Image (cartoon, rainbow, N blue to C red):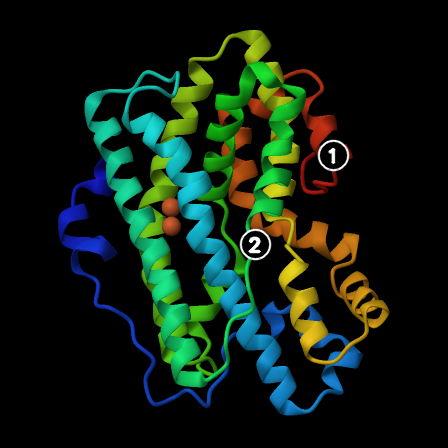
Amino acid sequence: MRAFNSWYEDAGVRVGPRRKPGDDLGKKFFPDHLIPHLGHPLVQALPDELRRYLSAQYLYQWLNFTAEFEIAVVVRATQQIADGRSGVSLERELRRDAMRICVDEQYHALHSVDVVDQVENSAGIPSLPYDFAPFLAHLDGIGESYPGHRKLVQLLQVVVFETLITSLIEDVPKDTEVMTVVRDTVRDHAEDERRHHAYFALFFKELWAQLDRSERETVSRLLPDVIIRSLQPATRSARAALGVAGFSPARTDQIIAESFDRQSVMAGITIASAKTVALLERCGVLDVPGARERFQNAGFTTVR
Ligand SMILES: [Fe+2]
Ligand SMILES: [Fe+2]
């Protein structure tokens, strides 16, 4: 597809430099406003050093999450598309583009852990252990009620994730208070993801066109949950970091509950998935009988 015409000249893995920490390590690890618990009054009252520790851990968990997600979720489904095993028939060039995406995502995973390693060394703040398994189990849990559609669920996960626009991707590169290595890392990643976004919008159109009526009904039932579970903020790492910062388990629970309350989490999900939902609308997903109501009931207040 057109978005991939210049892949050999533009892709991060082909032409991007290795990002290394510079001499601005005194700057922020991550924008404060993107770390929900950092705005909590109990956390605001902490000494600067501990707040810095919490932001470093937030950056690490985001990078570690990215590294795992790319391989376990994005490559898992995209390789099937590349190999012609996805159940969606595609012309050869589109399968080759899927292969290029797999290469991009492997590189994003490496890029992410490479930055964790280097920032750990330069800043002298070690990363807490990261466990991706609970997130993946939760995300894949959607397929459990639809065992015959496991592959379809995996394709939907990747379509949703690759068409989301999170405030993180938008805000971090512009934030001059954040250290350059972090801004460059997010910007590099976002540049590749623009191509992926175009690809998965097209892929979903093909997928949808090839489904029969009962499969369309299933997809329209699955999607609200796929979107919510893909975007639900993981709080385990934040919990662990708050513990190290000295909060008791009860205080930690309180901070997490108050910083990640249902209403603001759902508001964030609605904003981040606006482009995805618009794609679904264009393809006719919301015209399946009952689909609009299912999205509304799930909390997508912008769906009318
Ligand atoms: Fe990626
Ligand atoms: Fe991607």
The quadrant where residue 247 appears: bottom right
Q: Earlier in the sequence, mark 1 or mark 2?
A: 2
Mark 1 Cα shell of 10 Å, populated few (<14), some (14-19), many (≥20)? some
Q: Is residue 140 visible?
A: yes
Q: Residue at x 50, y 82 (%)?
A: 28
| In the depicted structure, whether residue 277 falls above or below residue 146 | below
Residue type beneath disc 2: Asp
Q: Residue at x 78, y 52 (%)?
A: 262
Quarter of the image with the C terminus is top right
Of the two numbered discs 1 and 2 in the rendering, the one whose residue sits closer to the viewer = 2
Q: Is residue 133 left or right of residue 123?
A: right
Residue 117 location (% of width, % of height): 38, 71
- Which residue has dot 1 on it? 296
Q: Secondary structure at mark 1?
A: helix
- Which residue has dot 2 on it? 131
Q: Residue at x 47, y 59 (%)?
A: 64
Q: Is residue 67 left or right of residue 271?
A: left
Pointer 1 and pointer 2: residues touching (CB < 8 Å)?
no
Residue type beneath disc 1: Gln
Q: Residue at x 40, y 64 (%)?
A: 186
Q: State the mark number for residue 201.
A: none
Q: Is residue 227 visible?
A: no
Residue 34 location (% of width, % of height): 59, 68
